Structure formats: structure tokens, C-alpha cells
């Protein structure tokens, strides 16, 4: 017994409240990124939406504003080093802070074979899936630490844990992203939390090119691909105070792939 009064636990809803926070989501105009943008806004956050196409960013921003939150659409290519400095500066110039960064943008083109993978494709895949998240987390993580804290969420892939033929650059880039989570959790801790969502197959627009059977079933405990909205619970957890003692973690959201 220390003699100190017991602290009451916050209400569960309060743990996930993002009111007064600013979230920046790359690849935020479609797919899993757009689901996270909507969820963060519904939880009270203002949102910076980044993707390559300005029109798509503005469409997503309109949804955020309809929820009563502020939105900043920014056209930026995650694979372009200089774009990321501009993106970070624009976010801070507009809102003065970033509390949650989600490195969600990615690409996973399938090459005919590893031997037939060209240098341009290799560099593009590495740039979007690893170089970009490294640069943006470096820029914003440092500012988060100076401001007293924040949360960085790297969206990785089951492809890094269960790599398949012809996906070498993608699997390698996502495995590097997993390692980067540990690097930044240590570098910017204890106030900045850095975690990985290892996403499995989800029925986003990318899945339209899948074989019909792949859209119906997966080799997993749940046995089916994920619905895009099923990423939201994990994203809200990692973004919010509910995850105050979670950092350097990799959380699989893949239906139990094996």
C-alpha cells in the first residue's frame, strides 16, 4: 500500500476519443486509407489526406468535413523524397501539429518473374513501400517527439511474413518497413509510439483484379478476405490513448492466415 488514492479508469469511449487531434494518412483517398480517414474523423480528429491525385483527396476531404471536422487534401507522391518534406510542412503550417501519422500508401505489382523485374519497377516498389515511410516518419516523428508525443502506424503486409514468388521487391520492402517500426519506436520513444498493422487480403479496389475464388475465400482461420471497414478497430486502437503502452508491436489483421 502506497497511501496514494486509486486512479479511476477512463471510460472505454474516452480511450478512443481523438478530439483535438490531427491525423495524417497517406494513401488516404481510397481503400484502407479512406476507411481510416473516416474513422479518425468520426472519433473527433481533423485529417490530412495525402495521395497522388488531388481530386481524389478532395473527395475524401469532403466526407471528413461532412462529419464536422477539418480536412486538408494534399496531392503528394510518397515515393518522391521532396514531396514528403512539402507534405509535412503543409500539415504543420495548416494545423500546427500532427498527432497521428499513418504510412498507408503502398503498391504491389506482380512481375512476370524475379529475373524479369526491371530496375524501374524495383525502385518504384521500394520507393513507395519503404523509402517514403522512412522519410515521412523521420520528418514527423522528430516533430512529434519535440511536441511531447504522438502515434505512428506503419501499414505493412502479410506478404512480408509469408512471402510468395514474384513479389520479392514488395515482400522485401514491407519486411524493411516492419524493421523500421522498431527503429523509430526506440528512436522517438518514450513519447512517440510506433506500431505496425500487418494487413492481409482486403476487398478494396485492388481486389477487382483477383481471381473470383480469391475474393471468396482465403487460407486462414476466418476463411475469407477482410472487408475494408474491418481495419478500423486496430487503427483506432493504435492511434488513441487505448494503446498507451503499445509500441514496437506488429499486429496481424489478416483473418489468421497460415
Image: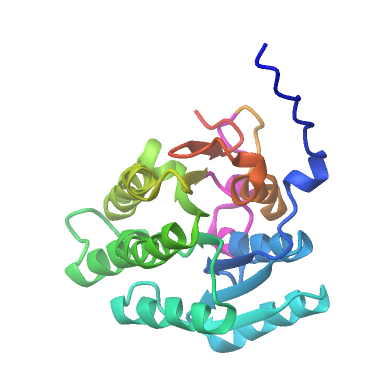
The residue shown at (42%, 65%) is: 143
Residue segment shown in magenta: 199-220
Single out the residue that lies furthest toward the front.
3
Q: Where's residue 22, x and y in %?
A: 62, 68
Q: Which residue occupies 36% across, 58% down?
A: 110
From the viewer's perspective, tell me whether residue 254 is left or right of residue 236: left
Q: Nearer the viewer, residue 99 or 147?
A: 147
Reply above or below: 115 against 186: below
Given residues 185 and 212, the one toward you in this image is 185
Query: What residue is at 46 percent from the left and 52 percent from the top?
Result: 154
For residue 108, above or below residue 15: below
**Image point (71%, 53%), residue name:** 229
User: Looking at the picture, how far across and down is residue 126, in whole percent?
Assistant: 28, 62
Q: Looking at the image, what colour scheme do you see?
A: rainbow
Q: Is residue 164 visible?
A: no
Residue 172: image x %, image y %? Answer: 28, 48
Is residue 83 visible to us here?
yes
Task: Choose top left, top right, bottom left or bottom right for residue 190.
Answer: top left
Amino acid at each position: 500500500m502506497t497511501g496514494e488514492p486509486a486512479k479511476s479508469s477512463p471510460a472505454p469511449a474516452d480511450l478512443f476519443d481523438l478530439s483535438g487531434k490531427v491525423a495524417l494518412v497517406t494513401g488516404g483517398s481510397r481503400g484502407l486509407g479512406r476507411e481510416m480517414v473516416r474513422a479518425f474523423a468520426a472519433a473527433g480528429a481533423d485529417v490530412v489526406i495525402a495521395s497522388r491525385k488531388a481530386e481524389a483527396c478532395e473527395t475524401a476531404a469532403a466526407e471528413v468535413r461532412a462529419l464536422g471536422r477539418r480536412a486538408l487534401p494534399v496531392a503528394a507522391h510518397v515515393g518522391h523524397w521532396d514531396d514528403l518534406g512539402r507534405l509535412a510542412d503543409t500539415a504543420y503550417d495548416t494545423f500546427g501539429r500532427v498527432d497521428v501519422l499513418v504510412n498507408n500508401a503502398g503498391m504491389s505489382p506482380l512481375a512476370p518473374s524475379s529475373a524479369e523485374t526491371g530496375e524501374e519497377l524495383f525502385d518504384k516498389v521500394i520507393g513507395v513501400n519503404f523509402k517514403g515511410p522512412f522519410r515521412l516518419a523521420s520528418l514527423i516523428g522528430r516533430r512529434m517527439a519535440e511536441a511531447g508525443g504522438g502515434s505512428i502506424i506503419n501499414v505493412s503486409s502479410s506478404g512480408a511474413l509469408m512471402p510468395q514468388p514474384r513479389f520479392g521487391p514488395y515482400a522485401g520492402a514491407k519486411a524493411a518497413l516492419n524493421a523500421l517500426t522498431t527503429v523509430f519506436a526506440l528512436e522517438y520513444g518514450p513519447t512517440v509510439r510506433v506500431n505496425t498493422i500487418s494487413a492481409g487480403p482486403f476487398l478494396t479496389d485492388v481486389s477487382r483484379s483477383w481471381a473470383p475464388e480469391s475474393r471468396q475465400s482465403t487460407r486462414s482461420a476466418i476463411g475469407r478476405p477482410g472487408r475494408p471497414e474491418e481495419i478500423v478497430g486496430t487503427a483506432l486502437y493504435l492511434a488513441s490513448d487505448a494503446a498507451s503502452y503499445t509500441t514496437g508491436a506488429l499486429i496481424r489483421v489478416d483473418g489468421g492466415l497460415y
